[in-house]
Image (cartoon, rainbow, N blue to C red):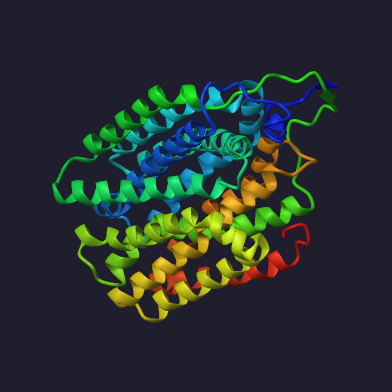
Amino acid sequence: MEERTQEQEFLIKPEDKPPLAQSSPKQVRLAISAFYFMQGVCFASWASRIPTFKASMGLNDAELGSILFALPAGQIITMFFSAKLTTHFGSKKMLRATAPLYAIALTFLALANTGWQLAAFLVLFGITGNLCNIALNTQGVAGENYYGKPIMSSFHGAWSIGNLTGALIALGLVNLKLGMYTHFWIIACISLTNVLFNSKKLLSYNKPDTVVEKTKFFTMPQGILVLLGVIAFCSMATEGTMFDWSAIYFEDVVKLPHNKAIIGYASFMFMMASGRFMGVFLIGKFGRKNLLQISGAIISVGMALAVIFPNLFIAIVGFMLIGLGVSSIVPMVYSIAGNNKKVPAGKAITMVSSIGYFAFLFGPPLIGYVSQLSSLRYSFGIISVFGMLIIFLVAKIKEIN
């Protein structure tokens, strides 16, 4: 027998076990949102520069797809002990350590001159990113319970706003012809400043006197967590495709100039962010189960429009629909998993995300390989199937209301 884990503390209602926080719930929400925002900015800074890497290294779609395999590979490497570290040190301490490492790892990407160097740095970027991600989403569950309302979607909305902001910054700096290394260090410095000023407002908890049965180092997900993980897989496969290939799609298929191709990525992120900030309202109006199924349908429709009618206006509309469709899926899945009464929050999130992250591992490379064999346009059509699969899987889960 051992003391209850840090993540299990997050499942206790705020009035039952007050967290160690000198800040108000509103201040805590803003601080957590700031961390989500900066993680989004860091990721978008990389994703928006993918066409530059592709062009400068002379990569074809299959070669780029193979290199993109490296980032989720790094995430998978840490998947089996990230929850253990967050349990041992607490999400607050983990974020203080991993958020700066993630920002610094971003700057290493700009040093790559060859494909293997880029792949190696992407592994590092994935490792630091996943350690930060598990701690951040565990802190997000804590913040949601502390605030007393279903605000997880707004946290992920802050990540999306950060993603959109990062894409717009990149768009401006590309047109100003600012070097990538300088660009990435500007972002890193902003991220480090955020850690310095906002980490003190994050939540931490005392260890309670009650004890529970000792759990294994890693437990395979079962029951509802498996289904939630597959739903996350479908959504993350779509997201990964849009993150890594949307700018290239607008450059190669829609035929936009290189310096304007980020518009496709930005249109997707704009609606993804908007949908996440509407998450609380939409959950209240439709319920989680109905909203998950509606989201799956919107993904399929948006992807079909972009593939069948690849002109500028319709492709933008299609990408915006895809962004709206995926916006609430992962936040809802993490919230449902994190409030599972049988498994600690951090471990439940890790179980679900460990399945979901395989989408990032296989999705973007698959797009590259199929594109090399046929075309990028038809490879995008494969992703529309995932929206329909989400509808089917959600119908199988009775625990969601």
Position in image of residue 309 (x %, y %): 36, 81
Q: Residue at x 34, y 38 (%)?
A: 109
Residue 87 appears left or right of 386: right
The part of the image, by quadrant, that contains residue 349 is: top right
Residue 229 appears left or right of 245: right
Give the mark count: 0
In terms of depth relative to the viewer, which is nearer, 285 or 336?
285
Instruction: Residue lying at the far left in this picture: please name it.
Output: 176
In terms of depth relative to the viewer, which is nearer, 16 or 61?
16
**186 relative to 255, above or below:** above
The part of the image, by quadrant, that contains residue 13 is: top right
Q: Residue at x 29, y 55 (%)?
A: 51
Residue 392 appears left or right of 365: right
**238 relative to 91, above or below:** below
Position in image of residue 368 (x %, y %): 43, 62
Position in image of residue 159 (x %, y %): 44, 45
Q: Quadrant of the C terminus?
A: bottom right
Q: Residue at x 56, y 46 (%)?
A: 151
**174 relative to 316, above or below:** above
